[in-house]
Amino acid sequence: MATALITGATAGIGRAFAEKLAREGYDLVLVARDEQRLREVSAEITGLYGVACEVLAADLTDREQLARVERRFAEGPIEVLVNNAGFGQKKPFWANTIEQEERQLDLLVRVVLRLTHAAVRPMIERGSGAVVNVSSVAGFMARGTYSAHKSWVTNFSSGLAIELHAKGVAVMALCPGFVHTEFHQRMGMEKTIVPSFLWLDATDLVEAAWSDLMRGKSVSVPSWRYKAVVAGVRFVPRTLIARASTIGLDGRRR
């Protein structure tokens, strides 16, 4: 049976991916910081779908713990990697400490780079596999370091997808907008300031993303609402986008 590794797997998009992949028959390696919560999710998924769930508790911003997750790719075949772990900053760049900014840079960029590298090398040898890097619609906009990190994830993933297509390995950037998860609550953001029609359901989002991956897309922007946003960004002055984009467009949970 094939195995999938998911980071940020205890809630939100990561949890939705865990359930989707379990329904597809994948055994799972679930990665997050909270071991107790991981074990609860593992037990629930195994009980519902009968798949094996391996728990791998790790703070991915810690280099030694990240290395332990990287080593897992050499210990047994991982057919699907979902890089989902992340967090947002409510304050602007200059109001955060440099340590906070570096931690976000590590998790959203360096961790994605390293885990993708660890995953695709054995995938290339096998001639099969898939990587989904959860990015954000915010990456198409100019609004601080979060936007810059997500722009990198999208460009990195779409470029790698072209390079690895002929080797049998799929890579896709998933670019959600606002999603009903714990992400914004943990940021301390008041969700009511966002119009209700902009909120997406995590399960529906993952179903659409998986369909896009199966169709060979390198960038997935689920829902007509956010497809329209991304299309509109091309024609709106960047200064106006920066003023309008006062909050992040994402919905993930570490």
Image (cartoon, rainbow, N blue to C red):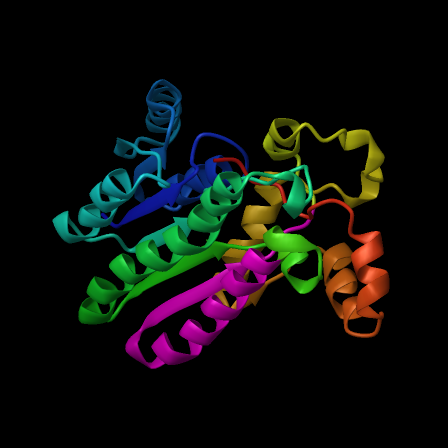
Q: Which residues are magenta?
A: 148-177
Residue 67 position in % (x across, y down)? 23, 46
Looking at the image, residue 60 sits to the left or right of residue 195; the answer is left
Residue 213 position in % (x across, y down)? 48, 62
Q: Magenta stretch: dominant SS?
A: helix
Residue, far left:
75
Residue 194 position in % (x across, y down)? 81, 39
The residue at 73%/65% (across/down) is 230
In the displayed structure, 237 sits above or below 46; it is below
The residue at 41%/50% (across/down) is 82
Give whichever of 124, 25 is nearer the camera: 124
Give whichever of 185, 221 is nearer the camera: 185
In the displayed structure, 208 sits above or below 184; it is below
Looking at the image, residue 74 sits to the left or right of residue 55; the answer is left
Give whichever of 215, 240 is nearer the camera: 240
The residue at 41%/73% (across/down) is 160
Give whichever of 96, 182 is nearer the camera: 96
Answer yes or no: is residue 34 visible. Answer: yes
Looking at the image, residue 34 sits to the left or right of residue 75; the answer is right
The residue at 78%/47% (across/down) is 246
